[in-house]
Image: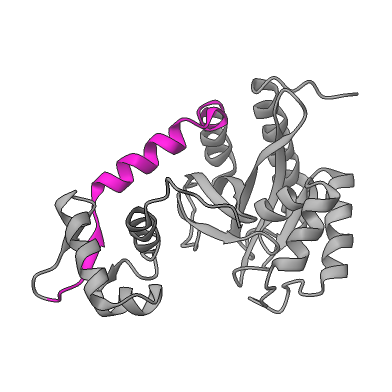
Amino acid sequence: MASKPYLINSVLRAAKLLECFSLDKPALTNSQLAKMLGLHKSTITRLVYSLEEAEFLRKDQKTGEYSLTYRLFRIGSVYINQIGFRTEARPLLSELASSIQETVHLAMLSDFEVFYIDKVEGSQSVGMMSRIGNKSPAYCTGVGKVLLAYLDKDDLNRYLDTVEIKRYTPNTITDPEELKLHLQRIRQQGYTLDDSEHEADIKCAAAPLHDASGKVVASISIAGPGFRMNRERMEKEILPAVVQTARSISARLGYMERR
């Protein structure tokens, strides 16, 4: 293995420590962090003290738990805002959410997972697991399946070889070969449906966003409760709306669709 003389282990450890915090675990103690990272408690103490001094962490004096501060949100916001297609997409996403009155998502792939970079609530929105900055499995979400469908063959095979497919609902596709065929159909038709595959009673329709080179860089979806997202509404209203909006955003990104 080639040496990496410029690596600073303490910086790498600090980065991994910050990644321990999540929406499910927004506050953690020294002991919990030590267990998650497999490091001695004294090492964790030095790391959290330094991060607290840098104002990336704050400590609850009553519980002894650490949590993230606004500084990391500010850094994350810089990353999200530098993604050009988010700026181009936002007005059309807002228009779509207003007209359909359901929740609209904008997402991209990050390490083969869905990374939500924007979300616009409709007037009839319901509680969902998706949040800006949050990640979800790609194989059982509408936005994720679209993005997987447009991967090249080698990347898709690498994904299928490494992903741990978990059944979230009775409708989750868990067989890799069935999933591969499903993704082929998505690429052929240019859109997909999520039939309550990740969250029970939540359905959605999703379509890809292409950049000027024709590459799929992100995807959008309309999501809502199953009782409102019935087959008739999906076919007559939801699918046409999400496909047309995806085409309009792609055009803003410089994509010229072949007729």
Give the total number of marks visible in the rendering.
0
Q: 77 or 207: which is nearer to us?
A: 77
> Which range is magenta?
63-91
> What is the x, y in percent for residue 240?
75, 40
The reply to whether the magenta stretch includes residue 181 is no
Q: Is residue 94 left or right of residue 108?
A: left
Q: Residue at x 59, y 52 (%)?
A: 2
Q: 80 or 106: which is nearer to us?
A: 80
Q: Quadrant of the C terminus?
A: top right
Q: 144 or 231: which is nearer to us?
A: 144
Q: 215 or 9: which is nearer to us?
A: 9
> What is the x, y in percent for residue 146?
74, 49
Please identify the quarter of the rendering in which residue 113 is found.
bottom right
Q: Residue at x 25, y 45 (%)?
A: 71
Q: Is residue 133 left or right of residue 206?
A: left
The answer to whether 109 is drawn above or below residue 174 in the figure is: above
Q: Main secondary structure of the magenta part?
A: helix
